[in-house]
Image: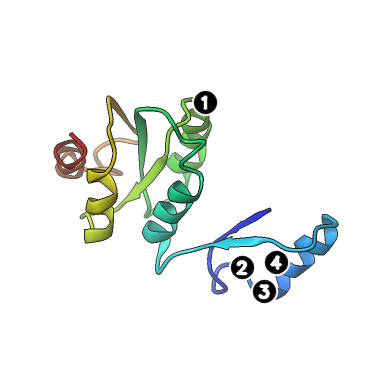
Amino acid sequence: MAVIGGEGVISNDMMNKAVSALGLKTAARIWGANRYSTCIEVNKKFASTLTGKTMCVATGLNFPDALAGGVLAAKKAAPLFLTANNLSDEQTAYLKAKELNFIYIFGGTGAVSENIVDKISRVAA
């Protein structure tokens, strides 16, 4: 079992209760310094499953687009990439390592700006 998020998101007590309720011995916690870093860590952890040459992008500032788009991401074996108004060095490095043929953008330009779409496209090319 994987628990996504640090202790500030899901306490150790809650994680232990879930592990116990499922009859497991332990769980792996996947987390980063913030939601964007956590997203990258999740994508890295499941890289052997996320084998498509497609990436799905959603805003990290509001959850509905990422939540709904996660179904398509799973169907396409594509990582889900959260972004805001800029790209961190960590995000840029992650994108540079990808070999993408297609990028799905979830939401309109109010959610993911054309500027960010352009940056992602250039970095991941």
Where disc 3 sits, the SS reads helix
Where disc 4 sits, the SS reads helix
Characterize the local packing of mark 4: few (<14), some (14-19) or many (20 or more) Cα atoms within 10 angstroms: some
| Vertical side of 38 occupied by 81: above or below | above
Q: Amino acid at mark 1?
A: Lys
Task: Name the residue that disc number 1 marks.
Answer: 75
Whether residue 63 is visible, yes or no, is yes
Are the residues flagged by discs 3 and 1 in contact, CB closer than 8 Å?
no
Are the residues flagged by discs 1 and 4 in contact, CB closer than 8 Å?
no
Label 3 to label 1, Cα distance in Å?
31 Å
Quadrant position of residue 23:
bottom right
| Vertical side of 72 occupied by 110: above or below | below
Task: Name the residue that disc number 3 marks.
Answer: 12
Task: Name the residue that disc number 2 marks.
Answer: 10
Please say which color scheme the image uses.
rainbow
Q: Amino acid at mark 2?
A: Ile
Label 4 to label 3, Cα distance in Å?
5 Å
Q: Pinpoint residue 44: horizontal percent, then vertical percent.
A: 43, 49
